[in-house]
Amino acid sequence: MRRFLIIGHKAPTAGEFSLNDLPGSAGRLDVLCRSVNSCFFLSHEFRRDVECFLLLLGEPNPPKTIMISGEEVRYLNPDERSAGSLIKKALSIPCGDKFTESTKGIYVRKGGLKELLDEYEFVVLDENGTDIRDITDMPDNYILSDHMNFTEDEESLIKDLPKISAGPKVLHADHTIITILNESDRRE
Amino acid sequence: MRRFLIIGHKAPTAGEFSLNDLPGSAGRLDVLCRSVNSCFFLSHEFRRDVECFLLLLGEPNPPKTIMISGEEVRYLNPDERSAGSLIKKALSIPCGDKFTESTKGIYVRKGGLKELLDEYEFVVLDENGTDIRDITDMPDNYILSDHMNFTEDEESLIKDLPKISAGPKVLHADHTIITILNESDRRE
């Protein structure tokens, strides 16, 4: 199982945003939608052995966490609007501290980074980290940020985690996931 | 300079499509929009040394070719709608056999694969090709298909070109471009 956690620093935490303006009024939700695509889609196949966590930190009810299970998810297409639409549904239902299923294979709960760090051992994708190609054993779980840097509070929570880089240039989160999964595919 | 040519077998050749339905009535234009993103975007940087060619083969006026120059292009954001909007503008202007600029750095002409093969030496991204990591000299110019296989006519035009693979699993066009550019970055 591979897990990717992408932090959306301005991503909305209620379902009222417009699918026609994911980069603007929906707080760069386009980055998270493309990251969902990167986690799961192969040509005529689907990565059932991946879980994608979206940490949403925008208004009005932060933090919320959405979990998409590659094993279970249905109704997900590769385009941004498709992921956006399923995220919108997840943010429209009441939720508490435990994951509640919004549509098949998509779950939402209140809570943020601290809870996830208690549950899984992550590495951090970081431009100054060790090149993924030089890592002997591929890590299972990866943390990425959206278009913004990690905040000071996030940095203090993740400062002792191993840092991994996807290559010599700093990539968007969705492109980084592609690079990590390509390396993973080659080692299977 | 790296060049990526992506063939959109059902992609529209007039500007009347809806940006709200890129995967449906716009003939999987979402694949091409994400491929444009893959060609150019780095985190807080832009790949000025890439050119992206979109070959559009859908109704009503096929074939048309759109060329996006990384050196010159402006007004392009990472989301699908942004690329879709610029493609829509390019398909809304009259064009002939020579490239006409529609918006800054984006050009459109009548014509298809044959013309491009006369102009550049391409390799074909193909699941049965040689692994890109095993290629001594990175090729400059790459042909990819959208969600459909190459047609018989296309196959006959490209059958003698070198075949390159991006790894052990068959990837979407936009993901393949990421993998190729990551390898290219590592050799710079």
Image (tube, coloured by chain):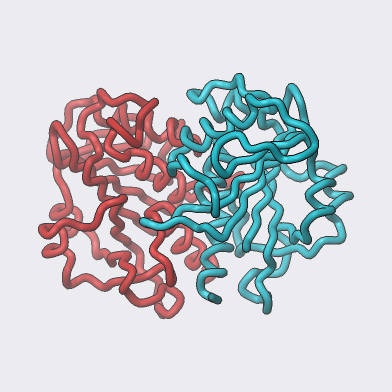
Chain colours: A red, B cyan
Q: Residue at 44% of width from left, 36% of height from top?
A: A80
In the displayed structure, A45 sits above or below A171; it is above
Judge whether residue A1 can be spotted in this image: no
In the displayed structure, A64 sits above or below A14; it is below
Q: Is residue B179 left or right of residue B161?
A: left
Q: Position of residue A34 (x, y in %)?
A: 42, 44
Q: Is residue A20 left or right of residue A145?
A: right
The number of numbered discs placed on residues in the rendered structure image is 0
Q: Residue at 44% of width from left, 63% of height from top?
A: A180
Q: Residue at 31% of width from left, 67% of height from top?
A: A126
In the displayed structure, A172 sits above or below A27; it is below
Q: Position of residue A46 (x, y in %)?
A: 52, 46
Q: Is residue B64 left or right of residue B103?
A: right
In the displayed structure, A3 sits above or below B99; it is below
Residue A119 found in image quarter:
bottom left
Judge whether residue B166 can be spotted in this image: yes
